[in-house]
Image (cartoon, rainbow, N blue to C red):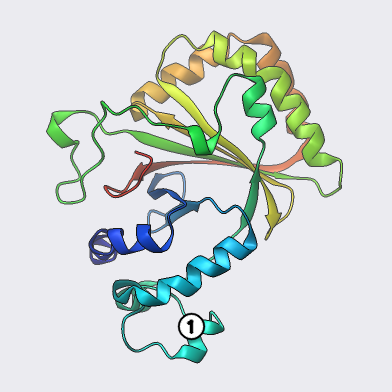
């Protein structure tokens, strides 16, 4: 895992040139396999994504010199040649952002989100907070909802009615909702929240504060009836992650 993460950092500039829509990269620390690294990219369209992958062929750090034109054009190979043997699995999903729901609560959404700059990222070399500060944590909260065309819209309606109340009740200042996403390709009727917490410990203060929000608690009760499963994972941002 350490060599994998080191290689990600070594090729970070090439990755950002090839995929300027990169928003975040995180390693799971609590709540799932600790060998999982998650990436979040923004694409305006499938065409933009396809074009970026074609242009990435010019980045030697990402594709090396052993990838044939046929493999590249057919998108049959993974990037980062030095890492292919280290991967046991690689999956991807296309998701849309519930931007209107976020904006109704006064939140900017992923493209306009700017993490606080005063926090230092987690450092791979020592696994200790940079400059002696407590490390930032990101939380991925994942709902697998029931199938059906109306399920995700109903979820967003309920979530939106409670979100403003939740944010107003949380006076800890410890947490920010970065984005709210729902799946469009891959496992369907999946909703994901990504939160940034000042520290892991501070996330508990935020959670306790939200319990004072009666509208939020009522919304969660109804959301629970729509969901098959709910998972949460705490992640650390990689040093080269734009969101950190």
Q: Say which residue label 1 marks.
A: 72
Quadrant of residue 164 in the image?
Answer: top right
Q: Secondary structure at mark 1?
A: helix
Q: Is 220 placed left or right of 167 in the picture?
A: right
The image shows residue 182, relative to residue 48, as above or below, that is above
Q: Quadrant of the N terminus?
A: bottom left
The image shows residue 14, relative to residue 104, as above or below, that is below
Q: Is 65 placed left or right of 120 in the picture?
A: right
Q: Is 31 placed left or right of 6 in the picture?
A: right
Q: Residue 233: give x, y in percent of width and height.
A: 47, 42
Quadrant of residue 134 in the image?
Answer: top left
Q: Residue 182: give x, y in percent of width and height.
A: 67, 45
Name the residue: 45% across, 54% down. 39
Q: Residue 126: give x, y in percent of width and height.
A: 14, 47
Quadrant of residue 121 in the image?
Answer: top left
Q: Is 150 placed left or right of 45 in the picture?
A: right
Name the residue: 59% across, 19% down. 106
The image shows residue 48, relative to residue 27, as above or below, that is below
Q: Residue 142: give x, y in percent of width and height.
A: 60, 42
């Amino acid at each position: 895992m350490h060599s994998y993460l080191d290689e990600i950092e070594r090729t970070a500039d090439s990755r950002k040139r090839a995929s300027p829509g990169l928003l975040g990269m995180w390693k799971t620390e609590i709540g799932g396999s600790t060998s999982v690294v998650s990436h979040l990219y923004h694409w305006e369209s499938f065409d933009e994504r396809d074009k970026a992958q074609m242009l990435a062929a010019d980045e030697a750090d990402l594709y090396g010199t052993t990838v044939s034109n046929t493999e590249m054009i057919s998108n049959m190979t993974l990037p980062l040649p030095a890492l292919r043997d280290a991967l046991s699995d690689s999956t991807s999903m296309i998701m849309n952002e519930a931007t209107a729901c976020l904006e109704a609560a006064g939140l900017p959404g992923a493209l306009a989100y700017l993490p606080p700059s005063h926090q230092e990222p987690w450092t791979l070399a020592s696994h200790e907070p940079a400059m002696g500060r407590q490390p930032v944590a990101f939380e991925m909260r994942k709902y697998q909802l029931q199938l059906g065309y109306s399920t995700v819209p109903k979820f967003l309606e309920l979530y939106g009615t409670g979100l403003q109340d939740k944010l107003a009740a949380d006076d800890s200042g410890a947490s920010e909702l970065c984005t709210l996403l729902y799946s469009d390709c891959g496992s369907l009727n999946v909703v994901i929240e990504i939160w940034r917490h000042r520290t892991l410990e501070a996330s508990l203060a935020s959670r306790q504060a939200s319990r004072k929000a009666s509208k939020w608690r009522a919304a969660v009760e109804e959301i629970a009836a729509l969901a098959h499963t709910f998972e949460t994972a705490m992640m650390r941002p990689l040093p080269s992650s734009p969101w950190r």
